[in-house]
Image (cartoon, rainbow, N blue to C red):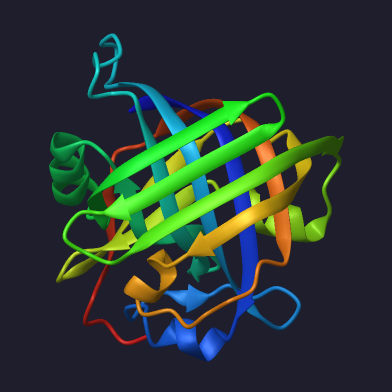
Amino acid sequence: MRQEWRDLLFVHGRIDADVLRNLLPAGTEVDEFDGSGWVSYVPFGMHDIAFGPLPPVPFLGTFPEVNIRTYVRHEGVPYVWFFSLDIPRVLPVAVARSVFALPYMYSAVRHDRIGSIVTSTTRRRGSRAAAQSVARIGAQTAGDELDAFLTARWGLLSATRRSIVEAKIHHEPWTLHAAELIEYDERLSAAAGLPPWTPERVTYAPGLPVTVGAPHRVRGINQPR
C-alpha cells in the first residue's frame, strides 16, 4: 500500500515502562530510551492511498489522521505500536481494522498548516476522547539519538485475538524541524488507558512517500514471552 504523509507533528513524552507492559500483549517488549518507555501524539495529513499498481483511491484515500503510539520490540526488532488512530472516514476505519488489526477510530479530525503554524483537532464519535494542538515550526534540525529512536521505525506491530501481526514500513529518513507547542490538550491517551504524560520532545516533518507492506502473523498470542 502506497501513501504520502504530510505535515507531521511529533509530540513525545516519557511513560513508565511497567504501565506500558500491562497494556501490551505477550510477545511484545517495551522499547526503552534513557530508562523510560515513550509515547507520542502524532497528527498529520494522509494523502493518496493506493494499493499495488493501482492509482490513488479518490476522496477516501486522503484524510487527516491523529495517532497515539508507543515503541516496542519483537525478537530484538524495533516497531511502532498504536493505541489509537483517529480518522474521519468510515470505510478506511473498517478496512484497516480488518486487514491490519489496527485500532482505527471514526472521529471528526482536522489538520492544517498555514505558514509556520500547524493546527490539529480531534473529537472521537460517541466518546469524550479528544485532542487539540497548535504548534509553531522552527528551524531544521539534525536530530539526535532520541529523535532517531522515536522516528526511525521501519515496521508496525498489532494484535488480533490470536496473533501478533507485523507490517513493514518503507520510507526515507525524516527531515525534522524543531517545533514549539502553543496550545495542547490531549485526551486520546487517557481513552487508551494511559496515564497523563508531559510532552518532552516536539518536532515537525514536512512529509514523504511511504510504502506499507502486507501484514503477516509473527507470533501466537498465547505463546510464552
Where is residue 162 shown, x and y percent of the image? 15, 71
Residue ID at (13%, 49%): 98
Q: Tell whether 91 sits left or right of 111.
A: left
Query: Is residue 75 shown above or below 183?
Result: below
**Rendering quarter of residue 53:** top left
Residue situated in front as seen by the camera: 22 or 159: 22
Q: Quadrant of the N terminus?
A: top left
Residue ID at (26%, 52%): 104
Query: Is residue 115 shown above or below 94?
Result: above
Can I make out residue 173 in this image? Answer: no
Where is residue 164 shown, x and y percent of the image? 28, 65
Residue situated in front as seen by the camera: 175 or 223: 175
Residue ID at (68%, 41%): 204
Where is residue 181 shown, x and y percent of the image? 69, 53
Where is residue 166 shown, x and y percent of the image? 35, 54
Q: Quadrant of the C terminus?
A: bottom left
Residue ID at (58%, 59%): 184
Can I make out residue 34 in this image? Answer: yes
